[in-house]
Amino acid sequence: MADATEREGHQMVKGISFIGLVALASGTVTGVGFLMMSGDIVAAVGSFNLITAYIVGMAAEIIAMLATATVASSYPSAGSVTTYARKIIGSDTLGFLTAVALWLGMIAIDGAELMAFGRYIYYFLPQINYYWWGIIITVVFIIINLFGVIMTSRTQSILGLIMWSALLAVPIVVFTSGKVNISYWHVMKETIHMSDWMTAIFFGVYCYVGFVTILPAAEETIKPERRIPAAMLTGTLITGFLYITGGLAIISLRPENQLLALAPSGPFASVWVKAMEVLWHGKGAVFMNFAAMTTSLTTANACIYGGARMLYGMSRERQLPESFRKINPGHKTPTVPIVVTGLFILIAVVSGAIRIVSVIANFVFFPLWLVIAIASYMNLSQIKKSGRSYKEAIPFYVPGGRLWATLTIILSVILTIVTFLATDDVVIGGLIAVAFFVATWLWYVWWKGHNKKKGIDIVAEAEKYESIPSDWE
């Protein structure tokens, strides 16, 4: 396996800096969820409970991330989720479907972000239809990703620093403005029904989905067994801090009824933007739209990168044709995965269905959590049976052992149910996702049979060429 790895496993450049990796993790988390859908939370459970939803969402994501961290550290692979399913659970088909779920989730997140970007930029240029901006930005980031991982990492680092600075400025500016009124921190509704809480929790968790998108970055990351889990944790904590402090700030500026005086689907459909209008004689809305645009750009770059690497990783697992794992000799990037991922994002953007596309992201990520959590639980159980300690076997070990995996299994089931009950768009989004999974599964059945007729066992080939170092286990 060492010879095979030398021929194929290290063609890519280990060019992602740690801050770039954190920005990739944070970039796919921060964006349309809390900036545009915060109004849904306020409408459902009241303005102060916006913070409750942010905290619940962050807690759920951290639990899932801790379960993911143990298995990601044990198997730092370009195939990521599909490798976990094949090597730990023992099902290459489940691995394929899990990888497809992760890829589709990134397409959905990016599609929603770029639709949101178009609506935010409408504030400055209302003459141009929003989806043109999504198309332009997608093409730009395809080109950036084609020119090499170092350029992608630097772009993401710069965008991440701008995004974090802009969002950190929100609570600083608000709390020093002299216009804060904490009497606005109350719930107007006398009664909040369970369905309202399910809606709030759905959108609160959606604010954080996407941290797993850096898992396929293993071949381009120095010490991925440590850096990838650390970047997931760091990115999630940074994002949660910005959500909570920024949320407290914006609900201090306007009473709830004014926050909800929003255009139903216009460019200002954000309680953040509406609140910030009270500062600087309306210039606060300009600043907030700028901040929102930076979050969308950071997500767009992260999802094109992550989606392309997931396709590359699937090809390394022999689940896609060889063209998907060919590396451009000059720029050291997987050209076909980048272009294919970008084209599917363009389709999502042109659809214009931001809510349905967002629902697809939640629909696929929670079952994805379930598979990762099962793999994490089984991996930890195998380590325990072998007589080794978790600290010896896992470079990035978080105290708690199988607790995080168990909690994530429970959470993923609960949140999948909440997704179905919380929003009317889930039926359409769910049907699209199911149709996509059925179509790709049928293709995979054909692909395995096609290779078998040629005398090729793709599972054995995956073992032979896997990107995990031969001495790792």
Image (cartoon, rainbow, N blue to C red):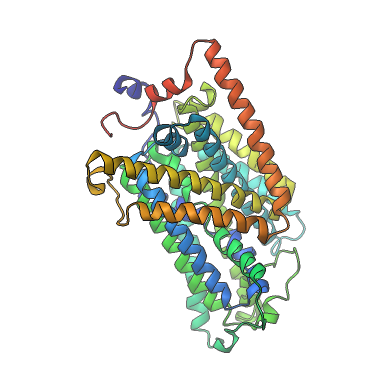
Residue 16 visible at all = no
Residue lying at the far front of the rendered structure: 385
Q: Position of residue 322 (x, y in %)?
A: 51, 21
Give above or below for 289 relative to 386. Answer: below
Residue in view at x 23 percent, y 46 percent: 389
Q: Position of residue 45 (x, y in %)?
A: 63, 74
Q: Is residue 354 left or right of residue 153?
A: right
Q: Position of residue 361 (x, y in %)?
A: 60, 50
Residue lying at the far top of the rendered structure: 454
Residue in view at x 49 percent, y 69 percent: 55
Which sits in the foreground, 4 or 449?
Answer: 449
Which sits in the foreground, 223 or 197?
Answer: 197
Q: Is residue 410 left or right of residue 72?
A: right
Q: Residue 262 appears in which quarter of the rendering?
A: bottom right
Quarter occupied by the C terminus: top left
Q: Is residue 253 left or right of residue 371?
A: right
Quarter occupied by the N terminus: top left
Give above or below for 150 relative to 59. Answer: above
Residue in view at x 50 percent, y 37 percent: 310
Residue in view at x 31 percent, y 47 percent: 226
